[in-house]
Amino acid sequence: MSRSYGNGSRSDLGGLIEKLSSPDKDLRYMAVSDLYKELKQPGFSCTATLEASLCEWILKKTEDPSSDVCGLATKCLAPLLSYASDANARMLVASLCNIQRKGTTSSGGSSLFKSVSLKTLIAEVPAAEGKASSVLADEAAPRMIEVMKSSGEQKGGASAIGESLDILSDLVKKFYFHKWSSHPDIASILLDIFSSPSSDAFVRKKCTACVAALAPHLDDAQLAKVVATCVESLCAAPLGGGAHTLGRAQSSLLRSQVNCVASLVTSVGSRQGLALAEALPRLTELCERHEEEQEDCDDTEALCDLREACLHCFEAFVSGVRGLDASHEGSHRRITSLCVSYASYDPNYAHDEMDVDDEDEENQQGESMDTGENGGGGVADDEDDDDDDFGGSDYDDDGAYSDDDDDTSWKCRKAAVQCLVAVVQAFPHRLAEIFEVAFDALVAQLKDRDESVRCEVICGVQAFLAALAERSKAGDGACAGACAQVVNGKVARVAKGALKELSQRGGASRVKLGYIGLLRDLAQAPGVTLLPHASDLLKHVQVSSLAFERGGERERECVCVCVVLISLQFSLTR
C-alpha cells in the first residue's frame, strides 16, 4: 500500500526518485504511483534540482520494461509539464519527441515510431491558453516537421510520417488558439509530402486530415496558396482515355486529391469555397461513364472508389459552399443528374428484356386500387409473388447478375443517395425541380440488392418528405403541391415494397424498421395520401410490431406512431 508523503518534502521526493531505479518492478510502480499522487496535489512544488531530476526519471520510466510502470509514468507527464519551469518543460517535450524519434524495432525488422506517450500528453493537457499548451505546441510541432522531412526515404518512414501527422493534427485541433499562421512552412511541407511520389495512400490520407485541420488557422494568403495548389494538382492530373483507363496507382492518387479538396471544402468552404469550386469540371469528368468501360477497365474496384470520392466531394460542395449555383450556373442540375445516374449504378447487374416495366405495372396497379379490386382498396398481399419488383427476382436470376466478391459499386450508389439528400437540403427554392428529376430514381432503388444501400435510400426518401413538409410550413403552397403530386405518383410503389418487406419472416431488421419510419412520414406528409393502401399497410405494420416489442424505446415509439397515423387515415375512408 502506498505511503503518504508531504508536499514538497525533499527527502520524500528524493526517496521516491531513488526507488525508480529499483530492479523490482512492483517497487518502481509504487514509486511512480506515489509521484503521480504528489504531482496531482494543488500545492506541489520542489527545488530546481529535484525538478530536473524528476523530469529526467519520469522520461526514463516512459520506456520502462514494465508496461504498467510505463503507462503510469506517461500519466505523470501532463501534471509535471504544468508545474515545471519553462526551461524544464521545454526540455521535457523536446526529450520526449527525441525518444519517440528513436523508435523501436519490430519482429519484422521495420522501424516503428513510438508516439503513445506524446499523444497521451497532448490528450491530457487542458485545451486552454497557458504555459503547458504553448510549450507543447512550440516544441512538438517543429520536431514533428523534422521527423517528416527526414523519414521519407528511410525504412519504415511511412509509419513515422503517419504518426507525426497524427500528432500534428492532434496539436492543431486541440490547441486551435495557438498562432499556427506563424508557422508558414507547415502547410508547404504538408503539401510537399502529399505530392511526393514516395508517399503512399496511408500517408496521403493522414496528410489530408492534417491539412484540413490546419486550414482554418491560416491567414488568407497562406490559405489561398494551399487551395490553389490542391485544385491545380487535381485538375492537372492526366486522365488518358478516361477514368476507367487508369491503373490502380493513378486512381489511388486521384482519389487522395479528390478527398483533399473535399476536406478543404468541409473545413474552409465558407472562406475559399468558390476557389475550390474550380475543381468541379474535373470531378464531373471523373464521373463520366463510357459504354465500353466495363471491358476496358482493369480495376473496377479502384474506379468505384474514385467515383465514390467524387460523389462525396460533390456532397461537400453542396453542403458547405454558399452561392455555388450563382458562381457556377446550373451546378446543382449537373450534380443532381450525376447522382440520379449513380444511384442505380450497378455494372454487375445485366439489364435485359426480362426486366419489368415498372411504370406500366404501377399504372395498372393504381387503376386496380382505385376500383377497389383488392377487397380493402389496398395493395394485394404479394408474399408469394416471386416476380415482385421488390422481391429480389431482378437480382436472384442467375442470368441477370454477375457475382463478384470485389464489387464495390454499392459505395457509389450509397454516396449518390447521400449527395441527393444534400442537394434537397441545400436548394429548398428549387425543390419542385429536384423532386421531378430525382424522386422517381430514388424510389426505384428501394429494391437495391445491398441492405445498407436500401437503408440509405429509405433515409433519403424520408429526407425528401421532410423537405416537402418544410416548404409547406413556409407557406410555399405551389412548390409543396407540385412535390406532393410527384410523391403520390410513387406511393403505390413504396407501399408495395413495404408490404413485401413487412410480410417476410424474421426479426426486426433495419430495413423493416426503416420502412415503418417511412410509412409514418408518408402518413403525415402534407398533400400525400396512403388511403388506397391503408388497410393492408395497417395489418402488416401491426403484425410487424410484435418483432419490435423487445426493441428500444425509439423503435417502439416509431411503430406506435406509424400505427396511429395509418389508422387515422384509414378511418377517413369509412
Image: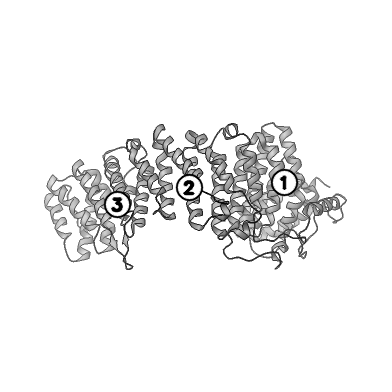
**Kind of residue sitting beneath label 1:** Ala
Query: Residue 150: which disc?
Result: 3
* Quarter residue 502 falls in: bottom right
Indicate the secondary structure of the residue bearing disc 3: helix
Q: Is residue 471 left or right of residue 170?
A: right
Q: Is residue 324 left or right of residue 183?
A: right
Q: Nearer the viewer, mark 1 or mark 2?
A: 2
Q: Residues within 10 Å of mark 2 (few under 14, many from 20)?
A: many
Indicate the secondary structure of the residue bearing disc 2: helix
Q: Residue 534 at x, y = what percent?
A: 77, 51
At 85% across and 49% down in the image, what residue appears?
370
Contact, mark 1 vs mark 2 (Cβ under 8 Å): no
Please tell me which of labels 3 and 1 falls first in the chain: 3
**Kind of residue sitting beneath label 3:** Ser
Q: Residues within 10 Å of mark 1 (few under 14, many from 20)?
A: many
Query: Residue 191: which disc?
Result: none
Instruction: For marks 1 and 2, give the CA distance.
Output: 44 Å
In the displayed structure, 80 sits above or below 155; it is above
Instruction: For marks 2 and 3, give the CA distance.
Output: 24 Å
* Quarter residue 303 falls in: bottom right
Q: Which residue is mark 1?
A: 523
The image quadrant where one finds the N terminus is bottom left
Instruction: For marks 3 and 1, give the CA distance.
Output: 63 Å
**Kind of residue sitting beneath label 2:** Gln
Please tell me which of labels 1 and 2 falls first in the chain: 2
Q: Residue 548 at x, y = what percent?
A: 63, 58
The image shows a total of numbered marks equal to 3
Q: Is residue 513 left or right of residue 133?
A: right
Q: Residues within 10 Å of mark 3 (few under 14, many from 20)?
A: few
Q: Which residue is mark 2?
A: 257
Please tell me which of labels 2 and 3 falls first in the chain: 3
